[in-house]
Image (cartoon, rainbow, N blue to C red):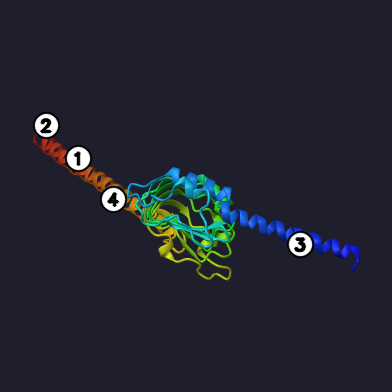
């Protein structure tokens, strides 16, 4: 066997051995990024019902055992945190920006809690994220356009919060997005065309994805023009009524003055007839 070939085989063997050691190390000690992610998330959340009682430092250093985890709501894959599902646990507090350290995360579900504050723009670094469900909380602020950097997103569910501002048009560029719901918030402005329609003028998301935002307009909701016409119609009716009242009042005054003038002329005629000639 040639020397170069034997050297290549040995090098490949060493690389595989190093990878095996790294995988084994992660399985035993956990990933420091996941540890930081979980530690900071726990610190940012309030848990009045004590549902996260086993979310302690001793588990954060090694949260994964294969696909399982001792931590409530955590699912692992190859020694990394793969899924976080903390739904309907009466959680309060805010979403930690250090969630972005869970770089292997593919599903984040914090729905049906009482979490407040803003959606951290740092979530853009979760490049493997496919499911984002933060619905039915008390989140406020604007939707970050940087979420569009999570190119694998299939689901974005933010309904039932207090989010304001406009819907970022960048979210319409997410090619894999199949479920989108921002209903029942405080969003305003026009719905981005690339979220309302697909290429070929086919509907993408229906009305239920956008309802409950009083100042939001555009297809598939009521168009701005029709809203504008309704407002103009109301204003027009008001102005019309006012002008009509003025015209009627003015006409009445003119008639009264005319009648008064005629009466005065008649009286003057009577007086001139009754006066003797000198």
Which is nearer the N-term, disc 2 or disc 4?
Answer: 4
Asked if 272 appears above or below 22 in the picture, the reply is: above
Numbered label attached to residue 87: none
Q: Could you tell me how far apart the alpha carbons at marks 2 and 3 are, in whole angstroms?
A: 145 Å
Discs 2, 3 touching: Cβ within 8 Å = no
Horizontal and vertical percent for residue 75? 49, 60
Q: Which residue position holds label 2?
A: 277
Q: Which residue position holds label 1?
A: 261
User: Which structural element holds mark 1?
Assistant: helix
Q: Could you tell me how far apart the alpha carbons at marks 2 and 4 are, in whole angstroms?
A: 56 Å
Mark 2 or 4, which is nearer the eye?
A: 4
Q: Could you tell me how far apart the alpha carbons at marks 3 and 4 are, in whole angstroms?
A: 91 Å
Asked if 45 appears above or below 14 in the picture, the reply is: above
Give the position of the N terminus as an image quadrant.
bottom right
Horizontal and vertical percent for residue 37? 52, 48
Mark 1 or 2, which is nearer the eye?
A: 1
Which is nearer the N-term, disc 1 or disc 4?
Answer: 4
Q: Could you tell me how far apart the alpha carbons at marks 3 and 1 are, in whole angstroms?
A: 119 Å
Give the position of the C terminus as an image quadrant.
top left
Name the quadrant containing residue 16: bottom right
Q: Which residue position holds label 3?
A: 13
């Amino acid at each position: 066997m040639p020397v170069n070939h034997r050297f290549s085989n040995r090098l490949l063997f060493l690389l595989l051995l190093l990878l095996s050691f790294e995988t084994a190390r992660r399985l035993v000690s956990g990933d420091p990024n996941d540890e930081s992610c979980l530690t900071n998330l726990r610190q940012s959340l309030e848990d009045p019902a004590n549902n996260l009682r086993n979310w302690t430092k001793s588990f954060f250093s090694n949260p994964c055992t294969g696909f399982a985890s001792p931590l409530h709501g955590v699912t692992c894959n190859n020694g990394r945190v793969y899924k976080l599902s903390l739904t309907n646990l009466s959680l309060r507090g805010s979403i930690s920006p250090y969630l972005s350290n869970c770089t292997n995360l593919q599903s984040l579900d914090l729905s049906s809690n009482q979490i407040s504050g803003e959606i951290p723009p740092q979530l853009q670094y979760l490049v493997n994220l496919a499911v984002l469900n933060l619905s039915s909380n008390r989140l406020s602020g604007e939707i970050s356009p940087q979420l569009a950097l999570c190119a694998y997103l299939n689901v974005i569910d933010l309904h039932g919060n207090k989010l304001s501002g406009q819907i970022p048009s960048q979210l319409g560029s997410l090619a894999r997005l199949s479920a989108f719901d921002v209903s029942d918030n405080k969003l305003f402005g026009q719905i981005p065309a690339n979220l309302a329609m697909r290429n070929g003028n086919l509907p993408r998301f229906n009305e239920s994805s956008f309802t409950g935002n009083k100042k939001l307009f555009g297809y598939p909701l009521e168009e701005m023009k029709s809203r504008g016409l309704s407002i103009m119609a109301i204003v027009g009716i008001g102005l019309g009524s006012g002008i009509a009242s003025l015209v009627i009042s003015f006409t009445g005054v003119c008639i009264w003055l005319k009648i008064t003038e005629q009466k005065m002329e008649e009286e003057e005629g009577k007086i001139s007839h009754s006066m003797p000639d000198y």
